[in-house]
Amino acid sequence: MRIGVLGSGNVGRVLGAGLAGLGHDVKLGSRNPGQEKLTAWSKETGPKASTGTFAEAVEFGEIVILATLWTGTKSALDLAGAKNMDGKVLIDVTNPLDFSSMPPGVLVSGQDSGGEQVQRWVPGAYVVKAFNIISNQHMVKPSFAGGPPDLFICGNDDGAKASVTGLGKELGWSVVDMGGIQSARYLESLAMLWILYYLKTRNENHAFKLLKK
């Protein structure tokens, strides 16, 4: 499968490398695709990896991953072109947080969420919130003493969620569908809970799991 990634930070590079390692073709999109760290990433990841602009990454991908800081999300989507995402699955990994102070402030809350805003910004895409409640170091093949953690996802299209579920399982996750994109309100709050525990312990080795009887 061809996968485009919007965002060249740690999250985008880790997910991109993980998916390339599984045999998918990945194009990492950036405002400056020729920068040294991306050239090194592409070389290290191997022949399944390439870089390009945001628009080139979206055009390339059958599925697109949105992995930007929230402050740059709308700009990245504008540069990629909303119409270019019509009919495509867009995996939203973002959290609407302001990291100018600690703990970070929540920029979207209440009767809205970052995931819902992304869906409004790209109305022709099938947005699925996922991978937003874990550190990047555990996004690929997560391993914990209690077994694999759960990847909570939400979105309005069942087919899109089935595609994301498949990728999640390939990456080593157990996947739990939490309903429509409005459930991003609660997944983004869960991300804040993850962050608060990290700030308390300074340890990134924690994750969430739904216990069932």
Image (cartoon, grey):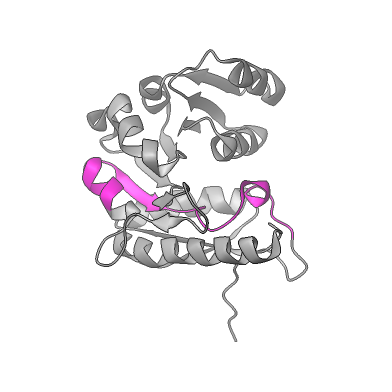
Where residue 15 appears, as percent x and y from the top left, is 58, 40
The quadrant where residue 59 appears: top left
Which stretch appears magenta?
117-143
Q: Nearer the viewer, residue 193 or 121?
A: 193
Q: Is residue 58 above or below residue 50?
A: below
Kindly identify the residue that appears in the image at 53 percent across and 58 percent down. Answer: 133
Q: Residue furthest bottom?
A: 213
Q: Is residue 32 above or below residue 128?
A: above
Where residue 103 appears, as percent x and y from the top left, is 51, 59
Where residue 130 appears, as percent x and y from the top left, is 47, 54
Q: Nearer the viewer, residue 80 or 202?
A: 202
Kindly identify the residue that appears in the image at 61 percent across and 57 percent down. Answer: 173
Kindly identify the residue that appears in the image at 61 percent across and 24 percent down. Answer: 48
Q: In the rendered structure, does residue 133 fall within the stretch colored magenta? A: yes
Q: Nearer the viewer, residue 153 or 75?
A: 75
Judged left or right of residue 138, residue 70 is left
Where residue 4 appears, as percent x and y from the top left, is 46, 30
The quadrant where residue 17 appears: top right
Judged left or right of residue 53, residue 205 is right
Q: Is residue 56 above or below residue 191?
A: above
Judged left or right of residue 113, residue 146 is right
Q: Give the quadrant of the C terminus.
A: bottom right
Q: Nearer the viewer, residue 102 or 123?
A: 102
Q: Is residue 93 above or below residue 113?
A: above
Q: In the rendered structure, does residue 108 fall within the stretch colored magenta? A: no
